[in-house]
Amino acid sequence: MRPVALATGIAGIAAVGVLLAVGAASVEKPPAIGSAGIFAKAETKDKAAPAAIAPIAVDATLSTATTPNGSKPETPSDNQADSMPTARDPPAAEAKPAELKPVDIARPVADSAGVLIIAGKKLQLAGITPTDPNRTCTGPNGKEWPCGTIARTALRAFLRARAITCDLPDGDWQGTVTGNCRFVKTDLSEWLARNGWAEVEAGSPLAAAADEARKNNRGIYGDDPRKDRPSTLAPAPAREDPLNPI
């Protein structure tokens, strides 16, 4: 009896051990507590940690990229710059010509046929080219003569200490000023051009008067007026009558 009972008891104990082993295998192993313990595992189950956002790399070739035809593609900034109006400089104000006024000049002296001297200041007659006093001319007869000196003498003889009127911006000028001058109704520039004592500027309204002088061999276009012909310098002065003095 005893050996049978002992064997039966051992078999029962073995069966209980097997059942306990099977039951233990079906139970979940508890999480370990530590640096990767239960709290860390529970947190990973509820919500996954967000992944780090990597920086966006900018392609350096975009700024130098070209289109298939080789041209640089337009960017919004380029289009905006082209469409924006550019600032323009304001138009420069046109200089108004100086207002001329008649100025009376007493006893001018001819420095040349075209330039007058008044109190140390110079006034050039408008529309003509002054004749250099040192100029020489060759007349139709082939002889040379001092036409520049004779032209100056002719103008001096015409003025004869007379008072003239000139159209000038100001009666008090410095250096040299250019203007139209006249004695009563005789324009001095026109008188010089018509008598051939000065050449006219290009485009001058006195061109017709100069052409007339050239065709008629007057002044610098002719022969020396001092020889074998009446002088063209000025009218001969009236002779004084001893019995009836002027």
Image: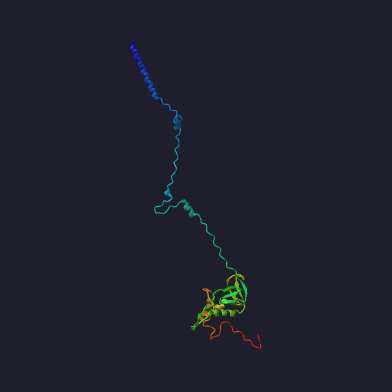
Query: Which quadrant is the C terminus positioned in?
Result: bottom right
Residue 240: where, in percent of width, then height?
63, 86
Which residue is at 39% across, 23% downward? 24
Q: 219 or 16, which is in the foreground?
A: 219
Give the residue at the far bottom of this rendering. 243
Which residue is at 43% across, 48% downward? 60
Q: 11 or 146, which is in the foreground?
A: 146
Q: Is residue 156 above or below residue 82?
A: below
Residue 225: where, in percent of width, then height?
54, 83
Residue 116: where, in percent of width, then height?
58, 75
Q: 183 or 243, which is in the foreground?
A: 243
Residue 21 shown left or right of residue 240 in the figure: left
- Quarter of the view holding residue 21: top left
Q: 223 or 90, which is in the foreground?
A: 223
Which residue is at 35% across, 13% downward? 6
Q: What colour scheme does the image use?
A: rainbow
Residue 109: where, in percent of width, then height?
59, 77
Which residue is at 35% across, 16% downward? 10
Query: Which quadrant is the N terminus positioned in?
Result: top left
Number of numbered discs: 0
